[in-house]
Image (tube, rainbow, N blue to C red):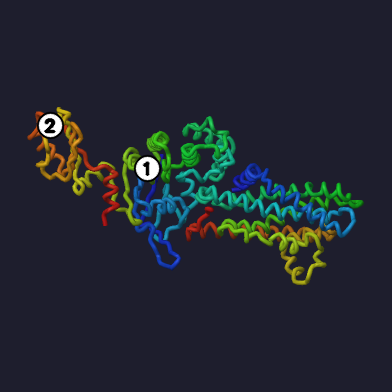
Amino acid sequence: MAEQGIVTRSLSREFKDKAGRVRAAVSGVDLTVEPGELVSVLGPNGAGKTTTVRLLTGLLTPTSGSADVGGHDVVRERRAASRACGFSLGGDLGLYPRLTALQNLTFFGLMYGLRGSHLRQRSVTVLEQMGLADRAGDTVGTFSRGMKQRLHLARALLHEPSVLILDEPSAGLDPQSAAAMRRLVGGLAEEGRSILLTTHDMREAEELSDRVVLMKDGAVHSEATPGRLRVAAAARLGHSVQIIWTAADESVPACDACPGLLESRQDRGTTRLRVRDGAEAAGWVLARFGDQVASVSVTPPSLEEVFLDMVDSR
Amino acid sequence: MTATTWRAAGDQIRMQASSPVALLAGLIMPVVFAVILHSYSSAAVDPAFAVGIAGIGYLDALIVLVVVSLLGEKQWRTLTPALAAPYGIVPVVLGRLAGMTVQALVSLPGTLLPLALLWGLAPGFDWLRWLVGGAALALATTSVVGLMAFVVLRFPFSPGMTNGLVGLLLALGSLLVPRDALPPVIRQLSWLMPQSHVMSWVRGADAGSLAVSFGLTAVSLAIVVGLVLRLQQAVRDHAIPLEA
């Protein structure tokens, strides 16, 4: 579906504080989201995620650099870029609480040039897609946070954009609603749209993303597939090795002599090690205690550990 | 853009039609005003008095509606998705003002009825001047109060934004006193106010006054649009929040 996706070139945005000091909220960001790709942007508060989203959606103008959305420059061709892009706000604001879900959608649909029966049909279709068809006639003020988040997503899809920018779509949702939201977003990615997702939910990012971009201090710190990020981080953080012993009592062997051992934890019939080299450690365990081992598994650091490592790094 | 504006007007009425504060401001306050004014005279109600009293209702109602409606937009953060849309917030603001004009128009028949019951209508009451003048005055008042809409959107709200505004616009608009009877300085300023030209026509001036009022109303609305466009740009350039 998407032909152009998102491209930013040295995108920067500075702000002046009250004392007149200039602070870069986003600095030299080069980012691409290919057609049909879902890219998650992760970063601590103040990393520049929301500013990047606001620059891409035309809510802010860049201080320098440029950005294309759907093949259109977000400053020089703002209206065309806006039509190519569906934008979903995080949180439960941004909707008219005294209007119904259908009235909200048809109002925002008009802003994007949809008219008459096509507008109504699209509104009904996206409400069905988001599982809100039976609440179409209810005022949004009566909706739960999860329903409002889905309505945000419905609004973003209304004009069938090739690019979707989703700002923390599952923020503040209960686990069930968050899982439902992940399924919805995952389904949208399969339809071939270019999706940029900002989130604090590592599981969401890992589950959904083709690529993850880690931002820190307004700049891109690193970017790769979730798997590659984890493997790359293993060189610094080591691997987790989980050993399940055949005996589930106090008699399980000690692994204090394991090569490259960083940390060891024992829990009944299971030992968890953090080691520099997972393969070497697993080999050592099997060679020394092979007849007592039920299973051994090696995993690189989780995305959350990679994220925390980035936040802590200088 | 036009479709969005019409729809924003309809939604304004849908969302705020039963605002008790606006109804109080648009109907009861002007009638109370009329009773006080009429205690100095025993004349029957003529179109100038009827339209002038309705004009007070317009002012009161529109100021309340601008504050309630646009602060609602800021509180609900609904202007942010509008700003990201192709035509931004201008069609929304214009639509809201159009809807408020229709709401304010309730003051025209709503104040005439009690006035007529209390003191009767003057012989040969000119219904055309009452109706056309009343409608033109509502438009003119909206165009002027629209400038306040910009202020409410641009700055954090404080009651000081509206304090004293009714009295000032009431005088400058020559709603109750003919322009010729105003003090010289106010008379000069009132030439800039579209309301004062509408009131001149209602008081018997020729159609030129009405044409001038429409011209000034258009200029005032153009200034409102220009200010909202500037605000949009300022929000994008300087990250001014459109949120309460």
Q: The disc numbered 2 marks a residue on which chain? A: A
Instruction: Name the residue located 57 percent from the left edge and 37 percent from the top edge.
Output: A139
Residue B118 sits above or below residue A246 on the image: below
Side (left or right) of A261 relative to B220: left
Left or right: B108, with B151 as reference point: right
- Report, in whole angstroms, how far the alpha carbon at label 2 lies from the one at label 1: 56 Å
**Amino acid beneath label 1:** Pro
- Residue B212 in view, yes or no: no
Q: Which amino acid does label 2 sit on?
A: Ser
Quadrant of the image occupied by residue B219? bottom right
- Give the residue number, with chain letter if any, for mark 2: A251
Instruction: Work out whether mark 2 precedes mark 1 in sequence or the reverse, and give the earlier one.
Output: 1
In the figure, is residue A193 to the left or right of B172? left
- The residue depicted at 82 percent of the width and 58 percent of the height is B37
Query: Looking at the picture, how far across and down is residue B99, in whole percent?
Result: 66, 47
- Mark sitting on residue A35: 1
How dense is the environment of label 2, judged by Cα within 10 Å: few (below 14), some, or many (20 and up)? few
> Residue B116, relative to residue B160: is it above or below?
above
Q: Can residue A69 be seen in this view?
A: yes
Quick check: A138 left or right of B47?
Answer: left
Q: Which mark is residue A117?
A: none
Q: In the structure shown, which secondary structural element does the residue marked by tag 2 occupy? A: loop
Give coordinates of residue B112: x percent, y percent.
81, 49
